Amino acid sequence: MNVRLACYLAVAFVLAACKPEARPGMAPAAGVANGPAPGPAVPNAAPTDPVPAASPAPPSPPVRPAAQLRKAKMLAEVVLRLKGTDLSADADTKAMVDKALAANQGTATFVEIVEAFALKDRDAELLQIAIAQPAESVAALAMRLVLANGGTETVQKSLQGPDAAAIAQVLGNANDQRALALLSPIVTDASRDLSLRQESLRALGQFETGTRQILALYQNKSLPPELQNVAAGVLAKAPWDEVRAEVQRALPPPSVADAKLPPIAELAARSGDAAHGEVIFGSLCFVCHQVGGKGIDYGPNLAAIGNKLGKDGLYLAILYPDAGVEFNFETTLLALRDGNSAIGIVQSDTDQEVAIKSIGGTVSRYPKADIVRRTKQKTSSMPTGLQSGLRQQDLIDLVEYLSTLRG
Ligand code: HEC
């Protein structure tokens, strides 16, 4: 039996085991629950034929979501074996692929199938997957496929919509030069939302050409002031030797008390005295961070920060707090009905009230009815310039200490 026939049989089996009546009271997943595929794909499914990729049918088990997932996975495995088939010339395989796609909506498998058959009409679904998990590698792959399909216009459209910031983030990870032309206009467009512009700036910084564009804006003094801090952080972490050298010439390094700081890569290669770093941490950082139960619970707990960030990431976090504000730790400003305002990190947000944690760690609750406006601040509430009173060696010791914190 050839591979294709075997695959058809497996699909017939999967579909047959998945009839809607086996699942009382549950919404059938589109495609999986439609019974055996009609048409010439299945008539050979005689019981005596060996059926690959599936064991004999169990006596009609109740189909639960887990079983549904298994079916979706099986369907995907089967069609992925037909990778590369020209679907325009093969209606049966196309029907099977459509079923597998429907059963695997919203997943990495969906993206894999689209890639396997070079499908051109799935851009909208690919973008939805990218938007749902913009930091994941599946999002980057989905975006690459859309761009390779010539879907630049679709992406452009989503950059006008409510998910623009997620799209910008994914464009930064997609490793496709077409992203540049989509991102750069947003950075300089003052009519766009500032956090979207910052996200686009970070995304541009993932590309060498994009980083050069940012540097040029900086050197021509055409970078708007509200983007300077983010740009400085993006430029400081440029990994390309040549760009890095130019950045060094163009941007004053952050100052410490006794020296001009060398590039972050150079700092990160040095080692320091962790015990002394711990003392520095106690004097400057406990006011906002906890480690080992000590300190104030305001910013992220740093007990395992050495696992999360390398030394270069630690220098960036300290020297350029605005370059990448931790999700969930954005500063929010509440304007209150009585004319007062509250600022801090949102700790909880229910139908009735918003709880705000202020610097110092106190939490205050405000009834929703008393809140007239709510704005996210664009900068980190971790101050810039914390290192300015330290000697260079103190900073190196501090980072040495942080890199030993591994939970
Ligand atoms: C006024 C409060 C404040 C002070 C002081 C402060 N931080 Fe922060 N820090 C924050 C907040 C809030 C965040 C999360 C928002 C962000 O990422 O910018 C943060 C984030 C960080 C992060 C990134 C954490 C992560 O999970 O990515 C590191 C590392 C860090 N701080 C280290 C330090 C060190 C070291 C010091 C002392 C030199 C310090 N901070 C002082 C408020 C503070």
Image (cartoon, rainbow, N blue to C red):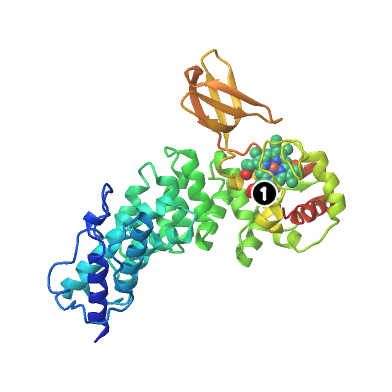
Percent from the top left, x then y, of residue 357? 63, 30
**Residue position marked by numbered label 1 in the rendering:** 317
In the image, 225 versus 112, the foreground residue is: 112
Q: Is residue 36 above or below residue 221?
A: below
Residue positioned 61% across, 63% down in the render: 239
In the image, 286 versus 363, the foreground residue is: 363
Percent from the top left, x then y, of residue 330? 57, 38
Q: On the image, which quarter does residue 216 sit in?
A: bottom right
- Mark 1 surroundings: few (<14), some (14-19) or many (≥20) residues within 10 A: some
Q: Is residue 153 visible?
A: no
Percent from the top left, x then y, of residue 224? 53, 41
In the image, 366 versus 285, the foreground residue is: 366
Q: Is residue 34 visible?
A: yes
Percent from the top left, x then y, of residue 28? 26, 53
Q: Is residue 24 above or below residue 122?
A: above
Q: Is residue 307 left or right of residue 20?
A: right
Which amino acid lies under the numbered mark 1 shown in the image of this protein? Ala
Q: Is residue 113 left or right of residue 388?
A: left
Label 1 within 8 A of ligand 1 by Cβ? yes
**Which quadrant does ligand 1 occupy?**
top right
> Which image quarter is the N terminus in?
bottom left
Residue positioned 43% across, 64% down in the render: 176
In the image, 128 versus 195, the foreground residue is: 128
